[in-house]
Amino acid sequence: MNAAFLERAMHEAGELASLPQTFAEVLRVLRDERSSADQLARVLMKDPPLTAKVLRMANSPIYGTGQKIGSMIQAIRVLGDRQVTALALSTTVYDMTQDWLSSLDRMRFWRHALETAIASRMIGESLGRKSTEELFLAGLLHDLGLLVLEKMEPKEFARIWNEAGKEGGFVGMEYQLWGTTHAEIGGYLLRKWYLPEGICQPVDQHHNGAILDQTEPDLVPSQILMLGHMISKFTIAPERELNTDALLATESLRSALGIPAGQLVDIERDLTSTTMAEADYLEMNIGTIDDLLLEANRLLFEQSVAAERLANENLRLRRRLQKQQADAESVT
Ligand SMILES: [Fe+2]
Ligand SMILES: [Fe+2]
């Protein structure tokens, strides 16, 4: 980790490093154990457009509360303070990054983020974990460091982004160039915002290959996010291809987390339609249904090509092993 670079990143990222005033207050109220639902509602209501959005989301059929939620305090009582904060934070960060100049395709960025958020939440639910809204937020914010880096070093960023689009290995290039990665920058930024460690640590670790097959309970949220990111079909870079390493990494994470293969297939199957539905109620622009279906089909095709490549490689290795055994037997 390059601490000086991280500090500079926070400094130069300007408005990114500091959340809007309302939100900083929301997080302060949440940290204070003596604070009440009333206090949280009062702080959130200082921002009327945010309040209106949260109420629209709280009334969406996705929550199926069966009641008409007409006020912030009611939303907090019905959905819980963490859920309401998660909704408010999602929309705050989404809105504040919308008008930054960027060579990254913002629609693709949020599409991947939202899909990863939903995948991580679904994986968490399938494992019976409690704080699934933290997993959702970790997913939504996991690549935020990319936007910071891009803002900070636009030329170098564009160069390695394009290079990696063809060759892969973006994270290695970041490390070589800056001694840190977008994952570490994202984790650092979220810690500056005083978000819980259950969000910061997974963001920080989401490209750390060393945790793939660990069975440490503390690493589970990080592994869930990593798996959520791996099974996200919508990538940020349009030309990025799936490779066999990604399939092997997915398999290691699945088995380390103890998720039955069939269960992960079910999650992957529902991911695209759930992402489309939730983008709608979160009021995020992630493209038209046609775009999404086209993209999902393209990636499914790539996945099957990668799987075939892996099967061929296995067969080749097995044949080589058999031949070596036969040769060894003929010698003895
Ligand atoms: Fe990433
Ligand atoms: Fe990602």
Image (tube, rainbow, N blue to C red):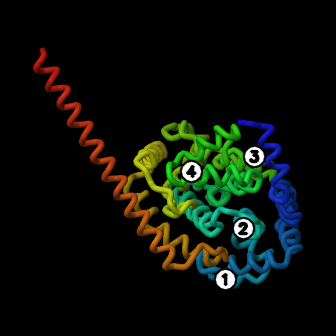
Query: Can residue 33 be seen from the camera position used here?
Result: no
Residue at screen point 78% across, 41% down = 5
Residue 23 drawn at (x, y percent): 83, 63
- The numbered mark, 4 or 3, whose residue comes first in the sequence reads 4
Closer to viewer: mark 2 or mark 4: 4
Q: Residues within 10 Å of mark 1 (few under 14, many from 20)?
A: few
- Which numbered marker is on residue 163? 4
Closer to viewer: mark 2 or mark 1: 2
Query: CA–CA distance between discs 3 and 1?
Result: 39 Å
Q: Residues within 10 Å of mark 4 (few under 14, many from 20)?
A: some
Q: Which residue is mark 2?
A: 94
Query: CA–CA distance between discs 3 and 2?
Result: 18 Å
Residue type highlighted by circle 2 = Tyr
Q: Are marks 2 and 4 in contact (CB under 8 Å)?
A: no
- The numbered mark, 4 or 1, whose residue comes first in the sequence reads 1
Residue at screen point 74% across, 79% down = 55
Q: Are marks 2 and 1 in contact (CB under 8 Å)?
A: no
Query: CA–CA distance between discs 2 and 1?
Result: 27 Å
Q: Which residue is mark 1?
A: 67
Query: CA–CA distance between discs 4 and 1?
Result: 51 Å
Q: Is residue 195 above or below residue 39?
A: above
Q: Is residue 84 above or below residue 314?
A: below
- The numbered mark, 2 or 1, whose residue comes first in the sequence reads 1
Residue type highlighted by circle 4 = Glu
Q: Residues within 10 Å of mark 3 (few under 14, many from 20)?
A: many
Q: Which residue is mark 3?
A: 188
Does the beta carbon at disc 2 come under 8 Å from ligand 2? no
